[in-house]
Amino acid sequence: MKIINLIENTPGTGGCLYEHGLSFYIETKHHKLLMDTGASGAALTNARLLGIDLAGVDMVILSHGHYDHSGGILAFARENSHARIYMRRNAGGDYYHVGPEDCRYIGIDREILKLPGLVLTDGDCRIDEELFLFTGITGQRCLTRSNLKLKERDGDQYAQDTFDHEQCLVVTDHGRHILFSGCAHNGILNILDRYHELFKGYPDLVISGFHLAQEEAYTGEDIQVIQGIARELLKTGVLCYTGHCTGPEAFAMMKEIMGDRLVYVHSGEQVL
C-alpha cells in the first residue's frame, strides 16, 4: 500500500507546491485513488513531480463540500475522464464562511455536479472489500469554536453548517485499517466513535485534518478542548497523521501529549 500527501498548507518535499488545501494519493492492491484534490490544480502538478500517473487513478473521494478539498477536481477530470468521483449528495450545497467583516462562498465549483463520472452517496457506502465510506456522525464530544463561522445559506438566511455533507473513507489492506477524513468538522473523536460503532474497534491509522486552527487567539477553554482531544486520541492507541486545518499551534499542544502517536505530514511527503 502507498499513501502520499499531494498537497497541504506547508512546504515539505523539495519542489512541491503548497496551499490551503488537502489531497492524498492512495494506492492499494485494487485501486489508485485520490482523497480530495486541494484548492486548485497544484495537487495535480505535485502528483506529476512525484511521478504519479494520474491517468491510472480510478477513483476520487471528496470528503466534504468545501473548495479547499474539491478545487482540483475539474482539472483532474479534463485529464482523466474514466475515474468515478464519490461525493455526498448534499456536498454541492450553499456553504459560506461568515465573519464580522466578510461573507464568502466556500463551497465546490458547481460545474463538478455536471461531471459524468459523479457518484452521489446518501449514506454509508460499501464500494468493495477494500473501500468503505461512512457518514452518520452525530456525537458532540470536544467540538471547537473553529466551525462556528461556517454556515449553509438557505435563501437570505445563514444557518450553522451541520457538516452532514462530510464522509469518511476506510481503507482495508492486508488486515490493516486506515481511516481518512478531510477536516473532521464533526470532530475527530465523534468520527472515531462512529467508526467504533461500525467496526467494533479502532483503526490502525487516522489521516485527517482536525480543524483546530483559528484566526483568534486560543482561550483557556479552547486549549482545554484541544488537550482533551489529544488525551482521548492517545487512549485509543491510534497513530495519527495530520496537517492542513489542524494548525501549527494546536498541533504543538497535541504533540506534547501524544508524542510519537501524532505526526505532521507536509506537502509531498509519503505516509506509507
Image (cartoon, rainbow, N blue to C red):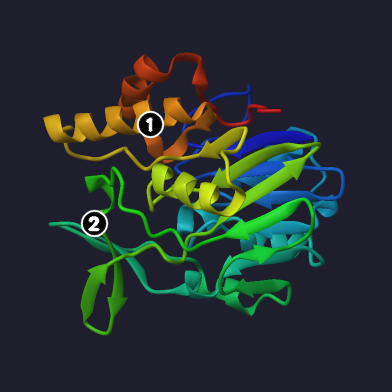
Name the residue carrying label 2.
Answer: 149
- Residue at 56% from the left image edge and 37% from the top image edge: 207
Secondary structure, mark 1, is helix
Instruction: Please give left or right for residue 160 compared with residue 230 in the image.
Output: left
Q: Quadrant of the N terminus?
A: top right
Residue 122 location, x and y as percent?
56, 74
Three-letter code, disc 2: Lys
Q: Is residue 74 or residue 258 the one in the foreground?
A: 258
Residue 149 location, x and y as percent?
23, 56
Cα distance in 3D space between marks 2 and 1: 26 Å
Residue 112 location, x and y as percent?
59, 71
Q: In the rendered view, would you say 25 is above or below 15?
A: below
- Residue at 38% from the left image edge and 60% from the top image edge: 138
Three-letter code, disc 1: Glu
Q: Is residue 188 or residue 270 the one in the foreground?
A: 188
- Residue at 56% from the left image edge and 70% from the top image edge: 123
Q: In the rendered view, would you say 124 is above or below 54?
A: below
Name the residue carrying label 1.
Answer: 232
How dense is the environment of label 1, judged by Cα within 10 Å: few (below 14), some, or many (20 and up)?
Answer: few
Instruction: Please give left or right for residue 220 compared with residue 193 in the image.
Output: left
Q: Is residue 204 or residue 154 the one in the foreground?
A: 204
The reply to whether discs 2 and 1 touch (Cβ–Cβ < 8 Å) is no
Lower position in the chain sequence, tag 2 or tag 1: 2
Residue 62 location, x and y as percent?
58, 59
